[in-house]
Amino acid sequence: MAKPDKSRKMTVLNSVGSLSLLSAVIYMLFAGFNLLGLVVCGIALSAVATPVVMHGDGIFEMLVGLFEALFEGVMAVLEGIFSIISALFSW
């Protein structure tokens, strides 16, 4: 059975949440753990997790959905970066 495609809003929300989570983690690796990094991580994780928890039936499905949303967001960000780079070299 095929899964229905996610809406554009959900994809954008996952991308923004994943990008801000990755940015905050990288920032905390270089600048150290501080309140700003932890707040951004918390907001980003809750932005990605809220729709997953609302549609999840069980705890396992919620965890898998959270990881799926995070990886989907990361892949969307990387796809955007690579398409920008390929557009620069293809004129």
Image (tube, rainbow, N blue to C red):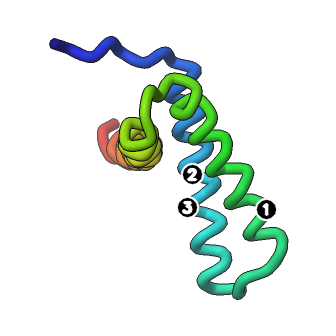
- Mark whose residue sits in front, 1 or 3: 1
Query: What percent of the width, then of the height, locates residue 49?
Result: 58, 41
Query: In the image shown, does 45 or 36 lie closer to the viewer?
Result: 45
Real-space Cα separation, disc 1 to disc 3, in angstroms? 13 Å
Which residue bears the numbered disc 2?
19
Callouts 2 and 3 close, C-beta under 8 Å: yes
Residue 20 horizontal/vertical position (percent): 64, 54
- Residue 62 percent coordinates (x, y): 45, 39
Report the residue at 32% width, 12% height from top: 4
Q: Which numbered disc covers residue 22?
A: 3
Give the residue drawn at x 42%, y 18%: 6
Which amino acid, by three-letter code, is at mark 1?
Val
Please determine whether, in this image, residue 62 is positioned above or below residue 19.
Answer: above
Q: Which mark is residue 39?
A: 1
| Residue 32 lies in quadrant | bottom right
Packing grade of label 3 (10 A; few <14, some 14-19, many >=20) is: some
Q: Which of the 4 quarters of the picture holds residue 10?
A: top right
Residue depicted at x 55% and y 33%:
53
Kind of residue indicated by mark 3: Leu
Q: Quadrant of the C terminus?
A: top left
Q: Is residue 80 visible?
A: no
Q: Decide: is 21 above or below 91.
A: below
Report the amino acid beneath label 2. Answer: Leu
Task: Provide the secondary structure element on which disc 1 rests.
Answer: helix
